[in-house]
Amino acid sequence: MSRKVLVLAAALLAVTACTSTKPPGAVGPSTTGPTDASQSKFFNQADFDRQLKQRTQTPQGDPATPWTQTIDASFVDTSKYRKDPKWHLCFSNASVSNPWRVTGLTTMKAEVALHPEIGDFTVDDAQGKDDKQISDLSDLLSRNCDALIISPNTTDALTPAVTKACQSGIPIVVFDRGVNTDCPVSVVHPIGGYAFGAAAAEFEAQRIPKGGKVLALRILPGVDTLENRWAAAKSIFAKAGANVVGVEFTDGDPAKTKTIVSDYISRFGTLDAVWMDAGATTTAAVEAFQDAGKPVPPIDGEDQQDFLELWQQQNLTAIAPTYPVYEWRTAVIAAVDILSGKQVPKEWILPQPVITKDTLSQFITPGMPPLFYSTCGCQKMPGFPQTWGGK
């Protein structure tokens, strides 16, 4: 898949969480995030506070395999789902509309290949459409799946379909994005959106003067994890006395991102920080400052290879919260454990690393393409790096 296609597809990024099953995003260094009446319906004080706490907790399990670790786990008995192999594992995927998801699906298939108990692996791609995923789920329920993994396209629209899938008796694993039901056997996710948004906002707020001008760039409205990210950042910037001069949606389009940043530079002369709710277009934002002959202010990205390399080469003042791709591995492991009758966490909360200047080099994988996400946990899997597009 070409870089252009992947980058444009990032416009449809729908990283999510949910409400009852959702990953609560961690925020802020304190444990008492202020209730902000101006926050959106997606803001949940309890989740906000819980994620604050989880950011500093030591996960259970082997740190060499973070995709098997868990935080605050409450295990459930799955003995009633135990079946003799070989199994038919099914996956209803929201989309492969951005580089994060492409890396994730590649990693998931590699994880499936590690389990000889899985005889068949069926994947349906909803192409970012709620209606198609609802239809996909209905179809999968008639295809003798032994377990069903679901990455919901959107929270509210897919909740009834996920509930129906649970009622079929097939064990359900939800990951990445959430739904408003706790019926899945296990829900897999990193700490959450608040944690992501807070990490970037704290970093930037600490490096700008009081009243410093901040431009917030978002991908899409109405996606819970993305809303959580902004909710956390909004609270932190308010506490720091930052002046958020604009909140703009980029659709994940690098060209649109660059135009927006250029316009704000023209209007305000410069900016003191750029906060982003996802990192796919961070390099475009950086280019806008460079084209204007302005220093690049504190900025955030993700573990996308091109941003990490740019950060290292140009010694940017930057940080990279992550929504680690290795959760795609964990979803398969959860399904295997359930069909083996092993206990699994009801809410499988994974560690969520934040890349800093000090750890940057650890997350750059030489020879990988620009849109590769290094938190895949795939570097030692069979077929790496070629299967992921590397050399």
Image (spheres, grey):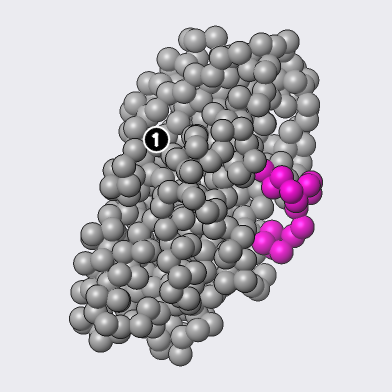
**Above or below, 21 relative to 115:** below
63 is within the stretch colored magenta: yes
Check the image and report above or below for 135 versus 216: above
Q: Is residue 375 visible?
A: yes
In terms of secondary structure, what is the magenta stretch mainly? loop
Is residue 304 shown left or right of residue 84?
A: left
- For label 1, the SS is loop
The quarter in which the N terminus is drawn is top left
Q: Residues within 10 Å of mark 1 (few under 14, many from 20)?
A: many
Front in this rendered view, residue 334 or 172: 334
Q: 124 and 229: which one is in front? A: 124
Image height of 80 relative to 246, above or below: above
In the image, what residue type sits under mark 1? Ser
Q: Is residue 166 at all visible to an observer of this figure?
A: no
Query: In the image, is 93 to the left or to the right of 266?
Result: right
Picture quarter containing residue 286?
A: bottom left
Magenta-drawn segment: 53-67
Pointer 1 residue: 95
> Residue, x 48% and y 43% (percent of image)?
391
